[in-house]
Image (cartoon, rainbow, N blue to C red):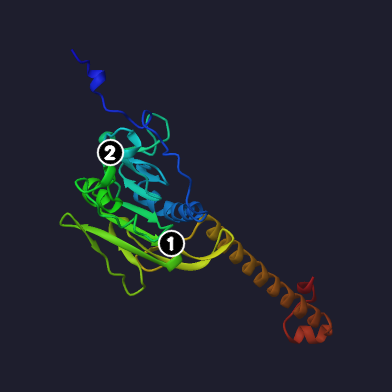
Amino acid sequence: MTSVSALTLPDHTQLPDSDGTFVKNWQEHPQSILLTDSITPVLEGLYPDSQYCIGQDLGIYWRLTDPPEKGAEAPDWFYVANVPPTLDGKTRRSYVLWKEYVAPLIVIEFVSGDGSEERDNTPPSQGEGGNIGKFWVYEQAIRVPYYGIYEVAKAQVEVYHLMDNTYQLMKPNERGHYSIAPMGVELGIWQGFYQNAELPWLRWWDAQGNLLLTGYERIEIERQRAETERQRAETERQKRLLITEKLRSLSVEQLNALGIDLQMLD
């Protein structure tokens, strides 16, 4: 007789957390940090109880295979709503759909080659050697509502929205951004300097088109505001000193005529 434990499906602690491949380009890591850092204040507002999860190059297990990692896709960045950030006090080694049940709201792939891998729509029935296309997996197996394909070399991002069980290529708005309505944000390309590199970075904006800033950018803006205020206060102080010195040069009679008591200048 087979025990209940033998029928239990593996969880994130029992499945591989890597397929042994290297990160394909140096820009993937800072790009992931940029997306996570700038969206965190928005997510904290949406989920004061912190019930959300962000994955960066983390495997999403959607089927059991041999070897196990063949049954996973590892998006460069993804976000899941209404799930705890940790499991039993442990960080996730992977995201296991048959244990979580909640699909990511959005997955984003950073293109390193020609983009064919990210747009591969090969179904299981046609995949040679069991290879299945990423596009098909996100659309038909995991059923992710939003799928972004970011190509830094072309300074562009494509965003697909799952509608009637099929991905539809979204059209950008008047700002050139793509609305991710459930998050209340827009996704688009920002040309600028980040992590010591001037590149067309993938970034978030709010629904009004205001760029969502990183923690460093918020601190830097506050520093600049404080410096501007300090300079303004110093300019005002210098003006007061100059006026005081001019008044000190006047006679008592002149000061009295102006209604100024000499002691006021001390």
* Callout 2–callout 1 Cβ contact below 8 Å: no
Image quadrant occupied by the N terminus: top left
Badge 2 amino acid: Leu
Residue at 38%, 69% (x, y): give it.
Answer: 209
Q: Position of residue 151 (x, y in %)?
A: 41, 62
Task: Bin the neighbour count of mark 2 within 10 Å (Cα to Cα): few under 14, some 14-19, many 20 and up.
Answer: some
Badge 1 amino acid: Leu
Q: Is residue 112 above or below residue 16?
A: below
Question: Mark 1 highlights which residue?
Answer: 202
Report whether 244 appears left or right of 3: right
Between the C-alphas of marks 2 and 1, the distance is 27 Å
Q: Position of residue 236 (x, y in %)?
A: 68, 74
Residue at 38%, 43% (x, y): give it.
Answer: 50
**As rendered, which of 112 and 265 lies closer to the eye?**
112
Please report whichever mark, 2 or 1, sits nearer to the chain's N-terminal start: 2
The answer, for residue 225, to whether it is visible in the render is: yes
